[in-house]
Image (tube, coloured by chain):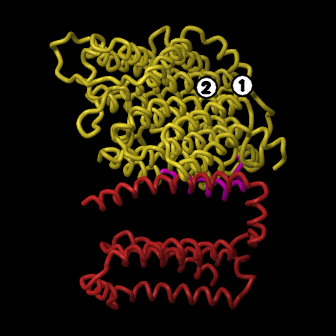
Amino acid sequence: MNTALFYLACVIALSATGLALTRANAAHALIYLIVSLLAVAVLFFLMGAPFAAALEIVIYAGAIMVLFVFVIMMLNIGEEGVERERDWLRPRFWIVPGIMSTLLLVELLLALRDGAAFGAALTSGQAVAPKAVGLALFGPYVLAVEIASMLLLAGLVGAYHLGRRFLVRGGRH
Amino acid sequence: MSGAELQAILPLGILAGGIILVMLQIAFRRHLATSISLSLLTLLATAAAALEGGADMPVTPLLQADSFARLFTVLFCLAGAISTLLSTDYLGQRDDEPEEYYLLLLLSSLGACVLAYASHLASLLLGLELMSVALYALIAYPNKAPLPLEAAVKYLMLSGAASATALFGFALLYAGTGSLSFTGLGQALDANPETGVLLPVAAVMVVAGLAFKLSLVPFHLWTPDVYQGAPSPITGFLASVSKAAVLVVLLRWFSDANLFRFPALVQTTAVLAVLSMLVGNLLALLQDNIKRMLAYSSIAHMGYLMIVFAAAAAPGQRDFALEAASYYLIAYTATTLAAFALLTMLGAGEGGREHCQLQDVSGLFWRYPGPAILLLVALLSLAGIPLTAGFLAKFYLVGAASGSGQWVLLGSLVIGSAIGIYYYLRVVFYMSRRPGEYQSRPGMTRFWPVRLTAWLLVAAVLLLGVLPQPLLHYLASIL
């Protein structure tokens, strides 16, 4: 049954990603992308890596995707925007992502019921706790953390300069 | 991390410290001259610290400090300093907030230096991404022209896809071997000679991802457009440092994990080499834009360099092949920077447009003899004419290829170089046109630091070609 759940989550992840790629509307694409990330998190969980699953949800599906959705929503202000948003929220748009997410939730609950023995059946590895991750990151891999912080600085400075071009032009016109 | 470990990676520490300093300076008080001087000082101090030497030791599992890493740190920092100097005049006409540019250039150089030290797939990926992410922003930097933005978007999309492919390959490698460090990978492959499908698939994905960064045929399609759209000083940096850094880390990976013993992998590099040499040179023939021509020529040069992987497969030839590769990388970096230095020095057209058509250099010998000599030396070196760095570099490659009996590769090298001479000399032919035979007359920068840098590059290219013994002895002693 573990394997069946694993493949079900795989199918959901792949089909949600495919749907995200083919949606013409950015808001709908994002919903499917979130479902896809949730499915990947469930995959991690089924394979006995609950910490990776939690990070996937907190960082990708949580922080980054919600930021995207916010930006898209904020671009639709005013009467016209309200109409458009109502249009987006018709059942035929949310019913498929809803079913996918429900399936994932059921999988998660089944996995939780079986407890710690669950992941062992699928992989030969051992579960890594948050403490071990922290010790590795600030022990042998501390330089990786430092280089990654430089990488983020490069991304931040670059995004600032590129974004500024549109801010300045926007103010001028 | 111990004190000795910190001491061993002092150059990286200085560079990172300089980056923080420049960032704070820009945040508190914008001042262009201060940013430029701080950047230059940081790069030169890093190069000096790397020249000073230090202990050869592994620093955490991620980095390996040794003479090879320090040599290329010096090269990348000097190339970064040259790009900084060349940009000073160029950027003034094309952007209204140029301070961050120098910060990004420092960050990109740091990524290249991390690659020179990397001995682990995690540091390889982080170094590669640090270099590339800073480059995306640098390519799109001039905010008064649309072409750079287009080039940056192309590079961002394709390079992101290539990185993701390589990363997937790394994950499969880890699944197959249980190790991410270069030496660990080699040992795992020795202990457990896997015959399944996992490792070949991983190898294909990693090769595809890294071949994209080196713009080897058939992963080269982005190169001409990105080179043409990017600001000239950045194109020089992209063509020299970003490629040399990837090649350096590949050389270290191949020798640490002894990947030369896998014939399929070595044959793949040989096929990429032949394709790049022939396709790159043939397509360069068709170009009227000097930057696009140099893009195809850089594809061909990376093809020449890939010969060393096949040459190093013969155990007796390995040190010689690595020596040839190191010398070629140094010569190629100096030459490429010199070629793009001239394109940087040509004055801007309407709306910051760059002058880089063949027409734009017509009659350059009569109008600006000094800069024309710079381009002449660079082109002769790229073509591999004696007395320049490029000749000796190619000579070394021929030696490595014939020593290990790689006759097909050697044949492609000869054919490619013969084609190359035609399109390099075509530019020289345009430059020697008499007045009255041309219309376009772009100006030339009068800013003395830029001119000084250009002359230093000419001197470096000639010196490497005429007096290479000190460098060659040094290379032989560290490999």
Q: Main secondary structure of the magenta part?
A: helix
Task: Describe residue B273's horizontal placement relative to residue B444 as left or right.
Answer: right
> Which chain can be seen in red?
A
Residue shown at 40%/22% (left/top)?
Answer: B416
- Helix, strand or loop at label 2? It is helix
Q: Is residue A136 above or below residue A14?
A: above
Closer to the camera in the image, B411 or A38: A38
**Mark 1 surroundings within 10 Å by alpha-carbon count, few (fewer than 14), some (14 through 19), many (20 or more):** few
Residue B275 in sight here: no
Residue segment shown in magenta? B162-181
Q: Which residue is mark 1?
A: B479
Residue B3, image x and y in percent?
84, 44
Is residue B180 within the magenta segment?
Answer: yes
Please tell me if label 2 and label 1 are on a single chain: yes
Identify the residue shown where x is 38% and y is 87%.
A94
Asked if disc 2 and disc 1 are in contact, CB closer than 8 Å, the reply is yes
Lower position in the chain sequence, tag 2 or tag 1: 2
Amino acid carrying label 2: it is Ser
**Magenta segment includes B138:** no
Q: Is B18 left, or right, of A154 in this rendering?
A: right
Task: Identify the subunit bearing mark 1.
Answer: B
What residue is disc 2 on? Answer: B326
Q: Amino acid at mark 1?
A: Leu
Chain painted yellow: B
Relative to B357, residue B65 above or below: below
Residue B53, quarter of the rendered image:
top right
